[in-house]
Amino acid sequence: MSLLRSIATVGGYTGISRVLGFVRDILIANVVGASPVADAFFAAFRLPNLFRRLFAEGAFNAAFVPLFARRLEQEGEAAARRFAEQALSILVTGLLVICAAAMAGMPWFIYLIGSGFSQDPEKLALAVELSRITFPYLLFMAVVALISGVLNSLYRFAAAAAAPILLNILFIAALTLVLPFTGAPGYLMAWTVCLSGAAQMIFLVVAAARAGMPLRLPRPRLTPGVRRLLVLLVPGVLSAGALQINIFVGSSIASWQEGAFSYLYYADRVYQLPLGLIGIAIGIVLLPDMARKLRSGADEAAMHSLNRGLEFALLLTLPATLALLVMPGAIVGGLFEHGAFGRDDARATAAALGAFAGGLPAYVLVKILQPAFYAREDTVTPFRFSVVSVVANIALSLLLFLQMGHVGIALATSLAAWINTVLLIVALRRRGFWMLDLRFRQRLPRILAASVVMALLLWGLQIGLGSWLGDTFLDRVAALVVLVAAGLAVYGVAAFALGAVSRSELLAALRRRGSTTGTGPQEP
């Protein structure tokens, strides 16, 4: 298996999902804008979505994949399947209890998500009702996460990466085809969240069966393997989800400012696109790849995979970061400024996006560096660093919110991510788990130079497009398309011209095919 080819597969499907997600959010912004209904729905979706990201993109995979990969490599598929079924049974049983308790005590959870909602009893009541509808999404996503881990460990990345597309398709259908007949956008969107979770679960259950790994639901038992999973899972919840926990904390503080909850949500959606395409995609592929290599004694190959993952990540992340910093207003205006989402909303969201963008490289690097620990069944070290990051975020959010409002919360999230990144890098180097190889050292300054060239072009183009960016919604969309297309073209030319990427290596990696089973992937 080519590492780059697998990253392209995951990133490609993730990209489709995120693009459809933008369509979804454009429709939401047009219908409810940054209104109290929008705040209530985003609060209702925040809690199960937080758990989804923790499970599907973080803690559960961090704990489950190395254990499953070890059995797959050392004991065979039958033993690995038994472990997956045991884990599934405990997971479903535990989450049924959690869901029941959370739905019963939902008003208290809403106070955690948006403490400022207490100022508006109607908004608080609506958020509670919508949260009870959306919360079962968590249970469905937990099953999706486990099956995704199984498929990823078998190097079958496509189905798990494609499953989230269903959420956006159902949302788009609900907002365009159903909403005109209901007139209740908050409730409609909440039920769509719940339905989409069930659809994703069914989709992956079928995919696992087709991959030769059908999973039953046996009687729950705390076997030694399950106990080990739980030991790794508990610290992994915080270490893998520090960014999401930081956003969660920031949103709660922001709920004291009218509309701020929505501004942060829309800004979060924009920078989540490159994070999902790059950081999460590479982390998903890298974890089973490194775990299986380390289990087979190929430590040098595992380090090579880490270097290539980081190189590829920065090749895409640095230009995305500079683009978000240079033109946040053009991006937000071209995506959301329409209907109920006005000019002031766009400006407030763009300010938050610029603050979030400064931390984008750190968000991505954390997603790639943490698997180097998880693959060694070490979730405690990242957990300790994440505790530092979360504490720093809380302190910075409270301090900066008083000075800068919701923009201070976005800035605090970025600073906390950089703290986490630095701690991970220092620990990996001290333990000898990671060293920059010659190729990476040569290409990093070239990647940065190509990104700067692109940023200068975008800055100049915005000056030229000045008035066009502020006219009608269609004009803003057209201007954004021109900026994005020009930026991509210039960065591509500059990257090849400066030697930031080799065309022959890229083509060779994408063309190489490999088996979906065996002792481990081949490298590009």
Image (cartoon, grey):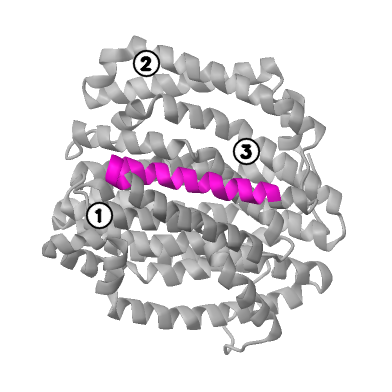
Name the residue type under label 3: Ala
**For residue 395, above or below residue 76:** above
Is residue 214 or residue 145 the one in the foreground?
145
Between disc 2 and disc 1, the foreground one is: 1
Identify the residue under disc 3: 313
Q: Quadrant of residue 128?
A: bottom left
Can you give x and y, in whole percent of width and height, for residue 274 in the image? Answer: 50, 39
Identify the residue under disc 1: 255
Q: Are marks 3 and 2 in contact (CB under 8 Å)?
A: no
Asked whether, in this view, residue 422 is left or right of residue 101, the answer is: right
At label 2, counting other C-alpha atoms closer than 10 Å, the crowd grade (few under 14, some 14-19, many 20 or more) is some
**The magenta segment:** 401-426
Name the residue type under label 1: Ser
Name the residue type under label 2: Gln
Q: Are marks 2 and 1 in contact (CB under 8 Å)?
A: no
Q: Is residue 512 visible?
A: yes
Is residue 410 or residue 423 the one in the foreground?
423
Identify the residue under disc 2: 462
**For residue 135, above or below residue 167:** below
Q: Earlier in the sequence, mark 2 or mark 1?
A: 1
Say which quadrant the C terminus sits in. top right
Is residue 286 or residue 78 the one in the foreground?
286
Asked whether, in this view, residue 16 is left or right of residue 173, the answer is: right
Secondary structure predominantly adopted by residues drawn in magenta: helix
